[in-house]
């Protein structure tokens, strides 16, 4: 992975990347409005109205709160980071949905639906997450999953995408050394940074689901708008902006 490393790689990254605070490196431009509606269309609210929903990898809770406000019977946001769960709880209080929207690090509750937005590229054990989802989902339930950008996207390195595909050009060691100039958490691998990066590709995700207790009901590898004309089965990994899918139990 990567060919430019050592002192050369580190100093090039310092020159090109500065202190790593570019908004571009979030992976995708931020959206106004609901991500769920933008990704799955306005019918998503009708599909999930009156249901118990788990938001798996909920982060600061925006999607979970949107679900509660749009008629979900009860929403459970799950994340391993207590720091973001506290933010989510305060937001639920502020928006008046704390009675039907909770945020926890784990649950044994069964849900009619699971949503997971921008999370599968961060899970340290995505196969284990799929197994856990299968235990938390009712028999006739459905998972709504999106993630992106995938690893071979021009900005698939998230913070490490100093410029398009930089995360593929520089070695992991050089990128981590550069990151340590402004992040003091001691991470030594991509998997150890805050939120984690598991190098998820489109094909790897397909294989994980194929080997899981689920089967795809719908699968879309949505191309990058500006690269749409170049998108084909051979270039898919490099031209996919976001993976959007639903899957159900076998």
Image (tube, rainbow, N blue to C red):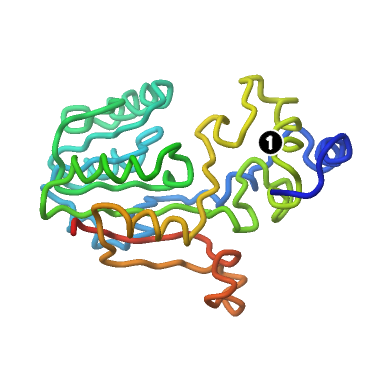
179 relative position to 33: left or right: right
Residue at 29% x, 43% y is 66
- Where is residue 198 drawn, in percent x and y? 52, 43
Residue at 45% x, 37% y is 124
174 relative position to 210: left or right: right
The mark tally for this picture is: 1
- Where is residue 38 drawn, in percent x and y? 39, 58
Q: Residues within 10 Å of mark 1 (few under 14, many from 20)?
A: few
Q: Which residue is mark 1?
A: 21
**Looking at the image, residue 146 lies above or below residue 63:** below
Quarter location, residue 119: top left
Q: Which quadrant is home to the C terminus?
A: bottom left
Out of 107 and 206, give the one closest to the viewer.
Answer: 206
- Where is residue 110 drawn, in percent x and y? 13, 39
**Looking at the image, residue 41 lies above or below residue 86:** below
**Looking at the image, residue 225 lies above or below residue 104:** below
Out of 43 and 51, give the one closest to the viewer.
Answer: 51
Q: Secondary structure at mark 1?
A: loop
Residue at 30% x, 46% y is 130
Residue at 54% x, 30% y is 194
- Where is residue 28 drawn, in percent x and y? 55, 52
Quarter location, residue 136: top left
Quarter location, residue 165: bottom right
């Amino acid at each position: 992975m990567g060919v430019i490393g050592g002192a050369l790689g580190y100093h090039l990254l310092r020159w090109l990347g500065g202190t790593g605070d570019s908004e571009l490196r979030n992976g995708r431009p931020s959206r106004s409005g609901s991500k769920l509606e933008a990704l799955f269309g306005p019918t998503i609210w009708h599909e999930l109205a009156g249901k118990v929903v788990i938001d798996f990898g909920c982060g600061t809770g925006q999607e979970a709160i949107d679900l509660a406000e749009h008629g979900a019977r009860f929403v459970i946001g799950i994340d391993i980071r207590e720091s973001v769960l506290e933010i989510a709880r305060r937001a639920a209080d502020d928006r008046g949905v704390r009675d039907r929207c909770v945020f926890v690090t784990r649950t044994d509750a069964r849900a009619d639906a699971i949503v997971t937005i921008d999370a599968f590229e961060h899970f340290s054990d995505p196969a284990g997450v799929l197994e856990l989802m299968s235990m938390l989902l009712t028999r006739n339930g459905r998972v709504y999953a999106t993630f992106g950008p995938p690893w071979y996207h021009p900005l698939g390195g998230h913070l490490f995408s100093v410029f398009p595909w930089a995360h593929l050009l520089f070695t992991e060691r050089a990128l981590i050394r550069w990151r340590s100039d402004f992040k003091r958490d001691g991470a030594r691998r991509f998997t150890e940074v805050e939120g984690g990066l598991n190098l998820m590709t489109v094909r790897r995700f397909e294989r994980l689901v194929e080997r899981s207790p689920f089967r795809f009901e719908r699968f879309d590898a949505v191309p990058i708008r500006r690269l749409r004309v170049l998108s084909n089965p051979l270039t898919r990994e490099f031209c996919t902006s976001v993976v959007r899918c639903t899957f159900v139990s076998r």
